[in-house]
Image (cartoon, rainbow, N blue to C red):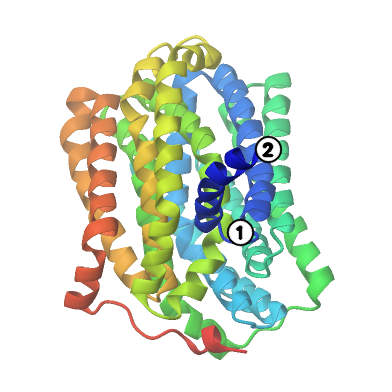
Amino acid sequence: MPPHVRTAARPWSERLLHLVPDGVARDTSLLFAGFSTRVLAQAFGFVLLARALGPADLGRFSAVLAVTVLLSPFVELGAYNLAVRDVTAGVEERRVIGNTLALTACALPPALFVLLAVGRVALPGTPWTAVAAVGVGNLLGARLTSLFRGIFVGRGEVLGAALIEAVTGVVYLAGALVLGATSKAFSTWTWIYCAQYVAVGVGGVAVLLGRFGVARWSGGAVRARVAEGVHFGIGAVAQSANAELDKALLARLAALESAGVYAASTRALAVAIAPAMAFFGAIYRRFFRAGAAGLPASRRFAFQVAPAALAYGLLAWATIALAAPVLAHLFGKGFAETASTLRWIAPLVAIEVLTYPFLDALTGAGLQPLRTAAQVCALGVGVVLNVLLDPRLGWRGAAIASLVSQGALLTFAVVAAPWAARVTRIGGARGKEVTAP
């Protein structure tokens, strides 16, 4: 390469290296491989599932899953986030594992009871056994998997997290293949779903115990985790609700077919956002390091990565809009309207990708309660709009509600968060475990 070309190219390479801290490219590549394997395998599995169940039963399953996802953070209680934080700070892994497992064991029975009660009211006609099966898969299996990921991400060993992501996706695809080869019944799928998530979660915990030794826990540490975990739990519920509750409301307020079409479209968005989630997973622990100096420092880090996030979000938006007809055809008979749905909700990719680093900046600075409050407010906006618009507009109402609520959350995270932190004084000092050597 001629000298003048190297000189001209150097400033751009330096800028790119400035945007991506040391080691992030490697970690992002590993997590992207894991996320991509999981998301693509689940996407193919979802296509098979849609073809096997049809719009009505797919909508029923999506509604059950949405309710379960809303409850799951109260079982996890921030297990992933707290594991990343504490392991990054030097807390012994087997203590993190033991305290998390003890808390999960206490939270699981009441959560299952609430799920069955809510399912009976919100999902009439759905067998309680199906609700219970999906609940155990998500409330137990997926939570154990989350603990596994948190331990390895906190250690900076993202290969472990990437591997379990890939395994989760492959097992999901295998389950969909089994369903297609057997009865293609809704109830059969719920038990397959349960078995695959529990198997992966239990296997992940077995690996943790084999590597780090017998788990250790104490009642005092578990109780201390509850207060922090509730904030993470409520925030995760609000985030999940913004992504999932619209499907349950559609099934209740509009039609199961409309919920099925909308669910298929949001699954396509999950595929599109996978590369960005790999990047955010790779840099997540760095927000805690930057946040030790306060919110301004963690926000500076967020602004560092924001240009790359925005560029990816806009590219994904355009790609989804162009590929919408092809994606609708893949889902099969009854899903033709998915092409229009995708074009409506495609901007959500850009909005969510840009929001993540600024919300993580709040968490890293010890301001998770403020993040939770913002997510709850966004959820409230979304629920009100869904209730008002879904009966008249169907999936279009759900799309409008998502765009408005997520847009409001983005505006707060980027523009208003520092002011809100000063005015409300929401948040507080970090726990003792964070400052452990």
- Is 169 rendered above or below residue 413? above
Instruction: Tell which circle, 2 or 1, labels the residue nearer the N-terminal end.
Output: 2
x then y, percent, for residue 340 = 34, 17
x then y, percent, for residue 47 = 58, 22
User: Dividing the picture into quarters, in which one does residue 17 lie?
Assistant: bottom right
x then y, percent, for residue 428 = 34, 83
Residue at 40% across / 76% down in the picture?
366
Camera-side residue: 394 or 236?
Answer: 236
Circle 2 is placed at which residue position?
37
Residue at 26% across / 25% down in the picture?
396
Camera-side residue: 247 or 26?
Answer: 26
Q: Is residue 402 left or right of residue 147?
A: left
Circle 1 is placed at which residue position?
146
Q: Tell me the crowding category of disc 1: few under 14, some 14 to 19, or many 20 or more residues within 10 angstroms, Cα based.
A: many
- Quarter containing the N terminus: top right
Residue at 51% across / 90% down in the picture?
432
For the residues marked 2 and 1, what is the alpha-carbon distance in whole angstroms?
Answer: 17 Å
Residue at 45% across / 64% down in the picture?
74
How many marks the image carries: the answer is 2
Q: Name the amino acid, label 2.
A: Thr
Q: Name the amino acid, label 1.
A: Ser
Q: Secondary structure at mark 2?
A: helix
- Quarter containing the C terminus: bottom right
User: Dividing the picture into quarters, in which one does residue 38 lie?
Assistant: top right
